[in-house]
Image (cartoon, grey):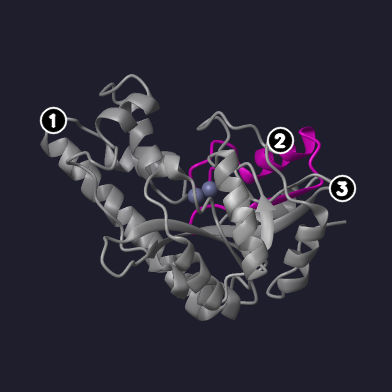
Amino acid sequence: MRIDLHTHSSVSDGTESPAELLASASAAGLDVVALTDHDTTGGWAAAEAARPRGLTVVPGIELSCRWFPDDEPPVSVHLLGYLFDPLHPVFAAERARLRDERLDRAERIVRALAADGHPVDWDELVTHADGGVVGRPHIAGALVRGGVVSSVEEAFTTLLHHRSPYYVTKADTDVREGIALVRSAGGVPVFAHGLATKRGRVVSDDAIAAMADAGLLGLEVDHPDHSDAERDHLRGLAADLDLIVTGSSDYHGSNKTTPIGVCTTAPEEFERVLAAGTGTAPLRD
Ligand SMILES: [Zn+2]
Ligand SMILES: [Zn+2]
């Protein structure tokens, strides 16, 4: 059994449609794949319609959250949620707020860029995002199409990185609130790439213990952005806190170089996810 529990389609910032993503999962020999677009369940229906025979699809999400340490600035963290009820009203309202927030933030970045002589056509950008969650990758694409920069990578290193004057922060959900929302909708919350120091500041072990107290059920241990030492540390924490251990590629199509299925979840750990998720059923034969 090959199980990859973290992928993105073009409904958020991946490059493949949900149908293309599932075809990639099958072609890579995966038995199980989770669709975890940022802050949206917008790809679930297309995934259900396009699911190839023999492939199990786990409906999921990756929520943008924050951890608030006592005397330091907040840390941006990502929370995976699996098998929750997409119609749970309080959780659905929070996802709608996050989507509006992302759209508003993207528009503020675009306006600031335009005011400084880096024009981006906002309407063209929104059309190009095709109903998906608009984020910095979409702005990067628009900057390339507009001839402002020559590549998406250049856009991120020059105009869109988090120390750029054009960067706008998001009002993300407190991660403990995110955990509670996923649980209340019958879902399984898993802390994504929790110690990936190459992505920026990370939280302390105490913070992870506090998340477990708040109802967290799993830690994503095997992730392309984790070093061997970070994986070992997280594996130990998961054992201490009795949390599910997952592994996944965080596949984004051609937006990142990571192949689908490069890190995977053990079948017995996946069984724990299935046992805990009661809000919606996995899609399978
Ligand atoms: Zn993430
Ligand atoms: Zn991700």
> Badges 2 and 1: C-beta atoms under 8 Å apart?
no
Give the x, y percent position of residue 49: 73, 52
Q: Is residue 31 above or below residue 144?
A: below
Give the x, y percent position of residue 74: 31, 61
Of label 2 and label 1, which has the lower sequence position?
Answer: 2
Give the x, y percent position of residue 236: 63, 57
Give neighbour class at mark 3: few <14, some 14-19, many 20+ (Cα, 10 Å): few
Of label 3 and label 2, which has the lower sequence position?
Answer: 2
Question: Which residue is label 1 attached to?
Answer: 117
Instruction: Say whether residue 30 is magenta.
Output: yes
* 253 or 89: nearer the viewer: 253
Image point (49%, 50%), residue name: 195
* 220 or 172: nearer the viewer: 220
Give neighbour class at mark 2: few <14, some 14-19, many 20+ (Cα, 10 Å): some
Image point (26%, 67%), residue name: 71
Q: Amino acid at mark 3?
A: Gly
Instruction: Say whether residue 42 is magenta.
Output: no
Question: Which residue is label 3 attached to?
Answer: 54
Quadrant of residue 75 in the image?
Answer: bottom left
Give neighbour class at mark 1: few <14, some 14-19, many 20+ (Cα, 10 Å): few
**Which stretch appears magenta?**
10-39
Residue 251 in view, yes or no: no
Image point (58%, 34%), residue name: 253
Q: Is residue 59 above or below residue 23?
A: below
Residue 246 in view, yes or no: yes
Determine the secondary structure under disc 3: loop
Disc 1 under 8 Å from ligand 1? The reply is no
Of label 3 and label 1, which has the lower sequence position?
Answer: 3
Determine the secondary structure under disc 1: loop
* 235 or 82: nearer the viewer: 235
Question: Which residue is label 2 attached to?
Answer: 24
